Image (cartoon, helix red, strand yellow):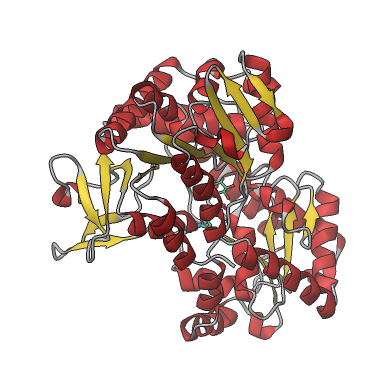
């Protein structure tokens, strides 16, 4: 099993004189100033930073990201550089300041109103606005300038995260033939018929083919990407070898499923703090009085299928009155991207659905749906996952979905049932969940009923198998699986990845 120490040793052993540069839209460390004027730095929640941070500490490289708060300016030097972690610096965070106008076009506009719905089959029309695309190009170029400045003609491995930066590999490659470049795409990739909706389809593909290694979560996203290249570019695609030859460039396309830090989530779930939260929540939710808890944890995003799961609970209550007064379904998680119409409208849809169901079935002493549209402290999320008789992940489409894996990692008692959409990448690995089609409301309700009537031996058998899989395929394995081919390419005197194909 991979650990953070294994990653560190791998980098120390194999990176040699290459500089490691990571690029993502989000910062690995966020600064803020409290009411007394004291500066604080913290790592945002989520496995991605936790996985890449040990690589960076071991390599002493640079992590380039967009600046997100005014407090950054208190600590950065004139070139936007901040030594991190703040208390015991081990590498450099370098921040890009972009204007509100640029952010609206690059981040909210092209990335989140255009590419996000384009790549997800969730029936929200993508918006492709040429002004947004201009900003996307500009900001990607500005990221490239910082990367090139950091590399300064030294040998370097550049590891790029996600769909905000599709053009960045090409902009780096235009100025630097020798850098080894890899990119991980955290969301699905659509088929050629969908992808052609993007007016700049060739630019995007051309940009991404400047990578030596391109990672997606599961094989079908890789196949879709290769089909798009085959359909729209003059390139040789080798689907059986996961390889594209494009001019004199070669890109390897690999499925590398992302994961979580299983051990730390498992350890947190066993702490006295989480046990105390479980007691408190158990009283608050009436679980100590025999109530049953169903749980959904999501950013409020239209890809997550939140109204679909609420309708399934409604159908369950229609069909099986024995759950009236007993079942509580808790939907928790913060609204997100609320500057975008489709997201704001989605929040209203969720609220209306919750109210409708509660008005229809609720009683003075019981509401079937609890909706907490907010973020919670990590121990509270952990306690909820431990308490939930079942957890629902009903994405209409989702690159991977880490909530499913976090539920499994939190179930240190090997109990609980995961109900998982067939359209989430996680369904590939978590075949011992109850797999549902979120659009098929009746079958979805049947699956909840099945979860609630499953005998304890079967619950444990399924949960144990899923825990073994997630424990083994953890976030450190993901990071190692990306770094190994990149370091191999750097060692092979820049015949790049061809030798590993
Ligand atoms: C993208 C892809 C892919 C949720 N609500 C709150 C909160 N969370 C936490 C969850 C989990 C994380 O955020 C969400 O991860 P997901 O994987 O579910 O989804 P996306 O944000 O859409 O991420 C996805 C992922 O990238 C990684 O590649 O799996 O498919 O879409 O850890 O527990 N955390 C806090 N407050 C919340 O309200 N603090």
Comparing 421 with 368, the one in front is 421
* Residue 161 in view, yes or no: no
Left or right: residue 461 compared with residue 396: right
Q: Position of residue 474 (x, y in %)?
A: 58, 62
Q: What residue is shown at x 33% (from left), y 30% (from top)?
A: 144
Left or right: residue 256 compared with residue 318: left
Q: Position of residue 498 (x, y in %)?
A: 57, 33
Q: Quadrant of residue 409?
A: bottom right
Comparing 93 with 39, the one in front is 93
Q: What residue is shown at x 81% (from left), y 79% (from top)?
A: 456
State which quarter of the image contains the C terminus.
Answer: top right
Q: Quadrant of residue 186?
A: top right
Comparing 157 with 316, the one in front is 157
Comparing 153 with 268, the one in front is 153
Q: Position of residue 96 (x, y in %)?
A: 27, 37
Q: Position of residue 346 (x, y in %)?
A: 57, 41
Q: What residue is shown at x 63% (from left), y 18% (from top)?
A: 196
């Amino acid at each position: 099993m991979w650990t953070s120490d294994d990653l560190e040793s791998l980098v120390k052993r194999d990176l040699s004189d290459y500089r490691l540069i990571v690029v993502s839209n989000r910062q690995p460390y966020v600064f803020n100033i409290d009411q007394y004027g004291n500066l604080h730095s913290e790592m945002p929640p989520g496995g991605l930073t936790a996985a890449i941070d040990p690589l960076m500490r071991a390599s002493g490289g640079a992590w380039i990201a967009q600046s997100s708060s005014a407090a950054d300016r208190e600590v950065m030097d004139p070139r936007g550089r901040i030594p991190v972690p703040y208390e015991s610096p081990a590498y450099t965070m370098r921040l890009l300041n972009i204007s509100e106008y640029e952010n609206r076009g690059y981040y909210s506009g092209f990335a989140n109103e255009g590419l996000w719905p384009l790549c997800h089959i969730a029936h929200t029309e993508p918006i492709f606005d040429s002004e947004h695309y201009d900003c996307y190009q500009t900001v990607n170029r500005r990221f490239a300038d910082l990367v090139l400045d950091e590399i300064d003609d030294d040998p370097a491995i550049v590891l790029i995260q996600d769909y905000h930066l599709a053009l960045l590999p090409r902009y780096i490659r235009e100025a630097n033939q020798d850098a080894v470049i890899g990119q991980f795409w955290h969301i699905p990739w659509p088929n050629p018929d969908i992808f052609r909706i993007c007016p700049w389809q060739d630019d995007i593909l051309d940009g991404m083919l400047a990578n030596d290694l391109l990672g997606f979560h599961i094989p079908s996203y890789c196949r879709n990407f290769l089909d798009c290249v085959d359909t729209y570019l003059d390139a040789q695609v080798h689907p059986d070898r996961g390889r594209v030859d494009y001019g004199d460039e070669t890109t390897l396309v690999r499925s590398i499923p992302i994961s979580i830090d299983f051990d730390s989530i498992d350890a947190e779930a066993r702490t006295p703090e989480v046990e105390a939260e479980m007691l408190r929540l158990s009283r608050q939710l009436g679980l100590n009085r025999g109530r049953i808890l169903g749980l959904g944890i999501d950013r409020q995003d239209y890809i997550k299928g939140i109204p679909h799961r609420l309708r399934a609970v409604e159908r369950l209550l229609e069909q099986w009155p024995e759950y009236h007064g007993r079942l509580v379904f808790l939907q928790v998680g913060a609204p997100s991207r609320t500057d975008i119409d489709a997201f704001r409208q989605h929040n209203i849809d969720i609220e209306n659905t919750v109210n409708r169901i509660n008005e229809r079935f609720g009683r003075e002493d019981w509401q079937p749906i609890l909706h907490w549209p907010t973020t919670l402290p990590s121990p509270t999320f952990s306690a909820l996952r431990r308490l939930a008789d079942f957890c629902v992940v009903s994405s209409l489409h989702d690159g991977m979905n880490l909530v499913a894996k976090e539920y499994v990692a939190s179930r240190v008692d090997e109990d609980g049932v995961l109900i998982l959409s067939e359209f989430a990448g996680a369904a590939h690995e978590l075949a011992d969940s109850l797999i549902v089609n979120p659009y098929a409301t009746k079958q979805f309700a049947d699956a909840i009923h099945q979860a609630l009537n499953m005998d304890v031996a079967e619950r444990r058998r399924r949960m144990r198998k899923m825990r073994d899989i997630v424990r083994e395929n953890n976030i450190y394995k993901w990071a190692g699986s990306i770094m190994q081919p990149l370091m191999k390419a750097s060692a092979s005197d820049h015949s790049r990845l061809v030798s590993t194909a």
